[in-house]
Image: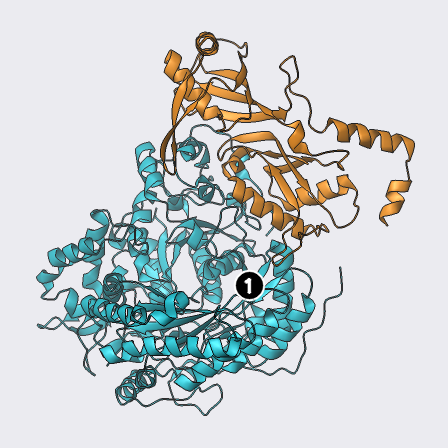
Chain colours: A orange, B cyan
Amino acid sequence: MRYAKRGRLRFTSHRDFARAFERALRRAEIPMGYSAGFSPHPKISYHGAAPTGVASEAEYLEIGLARLMDAEAVRVALDACLPAGLDIEECLPVAEGTLAERIDASRWQITLPGLDPSTVDAAGKIFLATPAIPVERPTKSGRRTVDARAAVVSLTVADSEPTGSCAILTVVVRQVTPAVRPDDVIAALATVAACVPTAPARAIRLAQGRLDDSGQLTDPLAPERAAALAARESVPDTLDGAQR
Amino acid sequence: MGLGHDQLGLFNVSRPDEALKSPVSAARTSGYSQGDMTAPDSLFPRLEPLLPRVTKPIQYVGGELNATVKDWDAVDVRWALMYPDAYEVGLPNQGVMILYEVINERPDALAERTYAVWPDLAALMREHGIGQFTVDAHRPVAAFDVLGVSFATELGYTNLLEALDLAGIPLHSRDRTDAHPIVLAGGHAAFNPEPISDFIDAAVLGDGEQAVLEITDLIKTWKSQGRPGGRIELLLRLARTGGVYVPRFYDVDFLPDGRIHRVVPHRADVPFRVHKRTVMDLDEWPYPKQPLVPLAESVHERMSVEIFRGCTRGCRFCQAGMITRPVRERSITGIGEMVDRGLRATGFEEVGLLSLSSADHSEIADIAHGLADRYEGTNTSLSLPSTRVDAFNVTLANELSRNGRRSGLTFAPEGGSERLRAVINKMVSKEDLIRTVSTAYAHGWRQVKLYFMCGLPTETDADVLEIADMAKDVIRAGRAAAGHRDIRCTVSIGGFVPKPHTPFQWAGQAAADTIDHRLRLLRSAISADRSFGRAIGVRYHDGKPGIIEGLLSRGDRRVGAVIEAVWRAGGRFDGWSEHFSYDRWVGACADVLPAYGVDLAWFTVRERTEHEVLPWDHLDSGLDKEWLWSDWQDALDETEVDDCRWTPCYDCGVCPGMGTDIQIGPTGRTLLPLTPA
């Protein structure tokens, strides 16, 4: 399943989303598979959630059902039970393996208010030319330093009118431990090139997937999409009939 | 204390925030005219850039499941409802949820919610000129007709002042103009609103469902007439109903020794006494029908269904039990419908059957059995806030936990010794308790929590030390009954605060030092015996916050200046130990109270005499003051009274005086299994 976290609901934390999602499963009466044991839990696996306050068009999770359902019907039912802004975008039956194997990087779009694209472009070049950029991040257990540079695969600035209103940056970042977040990249630009937006920057995760040799992200749902298409073309009615 | 059940108090989500894209709002924090002509701009576009800088921003964005946003211009009367604590505490409050839905069901009115904002955001809001906002449509609170504030506890008073200040509403009722909302207090603390009488315009005592509708009607009429006589006329019309207390129409005179001489209205057209409101048929008020479900984590991750209102057990310390009389049961079928509808509307996994003493519902066995049958195999768990100490309670708990875990059971003996339990009228013997918990352990429950209070009237060190003996006996009997040693007992103990409208309203509160001393003795008595090791845990609070709660509970109008001084010195979130400062309160008392010839001790540890005029005597909870006094004398004589639910009336005064009666079953109806949709 791919879902989006948009608008003001980008302020949901991962735990908030998980609670809302599990309640939506119950309200939508999705026949969930449950783990065995003393305290059974519905079978859900979440993949690396976007940080609290960061919007995303590409979050992924998998659920295990107790019986076969039409995937699009599940999507529609769940989406109707979630608030607008937490939107289930795609739902496909698993074709092979797990999503975790198909995701190792993210593409982020970062909007930097009050900066000229050319300024940010120059800062980006310095960023890419610097081998390591340690930045500090506040955590619950004090401040922690991470290298914001090594995980960044590419950094580009969109061409736009040099109105001075904002610059739009696209970065592809490998999912490493500790994670490098959009905030870290923004902090790094400030460190290496004194490139500081006039208002808080806003970030959106546009995509996740596996980096291919050309530095592009592959679609993690591609095998499912292909399988679903093939199934529709070869056996149009049997799947539908099997559910009843 | 202990009885934290004062939780009592549409459409799908639509989002005008996204619709109102206006990047700049003219809204500043003051000078709002009650804009009936145009809807105020959403504050969200200006709030949003600040949110990444604060903790738990999700609590400020709204968007809860079952939240309602109505068109501002399509209604006549607009309420902002506030729970004056953090969102995570305020959101699950049943009182606010009920009124929110009752008002929003009217086509001619709307209600939105607002909560106390944490100091990090409050500082940013001041810096950026953003006023206190509702979470539903992020409208400025100052633009509403009414700001209704539900006080479950007095420790929310400083948060009221903070919200008023952030909203740009003058702190003092007298400084407000026709442009400002009516500030209306409700909730249990409103049974003595005198300490906040400078800051509120009016207070409603008792059940709010019908009251908010009548107030809405009254405001609608007054507005449609062109607001004749302005704010004062509106307050007068409210006061004349007899069910809304408007402090400014009453004068309080004091005697030279600091006691109150009298409280009288200074106008002929307002009543001498203001009576509480009582909703009589709970089945007609099945609210909340669509309980709010937050995205943020809250203190109650479950759905609550109120199974009855009121309590007649007669525990003398319990304000809730006294002021919510008489008992009014929701019927078994009404409960069954609310559980079903609520689960469908929320997706919650747990349902709590809420009331002041849930095991006392006349058909509780059938309810428990019927619900357990209905939800067998669905991963839905049921719970009963249990305070009654008897084997029946264990039977019920067994039934409700048929599907799930048996982790912990809670009982509330409240007093450590049998003598003390006679004083507080909590009729349970030590043998009852041991038998009950043995039954629980034998049925597979591993953890028993026991609630007690410290600092009760007539209490001695010995009474409190008996708690240690009781806990040890519980473990001994429990190990024998369970046949193994893997059981635990947690003793949870808090300081007693005498409350208005109870037989203990005359009592001298125990000093903080006394409480702390007795708790120390108890802890060392428990830990002295190594054979119990970690089988007995003790949870406690120190005595200082209780003294301030006592000041605010039984205070009069002179305490208002203390509250204001504390707020000006930075006091907020006084219910949170990390924000509460005893020294700040003591300092404010020392600055303010000597001018009146009284002090903190005068309001708290001083015992009152029979004929002293109490600050809340003109507020009618239905209870006869003579009956309360005789019950206080019975307490001192260690004489118990029965529960009038099962025995003849003992004339507390509520039923005849207020034209009400207890409403209990059995109805003889049964909980039918649901047919699958």
**Where residue B133 appears, x then y in whole percent?**
41, 43
Type of the residue with mark 1: Tyr
The residue tagged 1 is: B287
Count of numbered tags: 1
Secondary structure under the numbered disc 1 in the rendered image? loop
**Where residue B185 appears, x then y in whole percent?**
36, 60
Q: Give the camera-side residue of B652 and A145.
A: A145
Q: Give the camera-side residue of B628 and B233.
A: B628
Q: Is residue A210 left or right of residue A166?
A: right
Residue at the (64%, 73%) spot, across then down: B333
**For the N terminus of chain B, which image quadrant?**
bottom left
Q: Give the camera-side residue of A153 and B301.
A: A153
Q: Is residue B496 left or right of residue A127?
A: left
Residue at the (23%, 81%) spot, across then down: B458
**Which residue is most to the bottom?**
B648
Name the quadrant containing residue B6. Answer: bottom left
Subunit bearing disc 1: B
Give the answer, above or below, for where B436 lies relative to A121: below
Name the quadrant containing residue A101. Answer: top right
**Which residue is most to the front?**
B531
**Where residue B464 appears, x then y in whole percent?**
28, 76
Residue at the (28%, 47%) spot, across then down: B170
Residue at the (86%, 33%) spot, across then down: A231
- The answer to whether any part of residue B446 appears in the image is yes
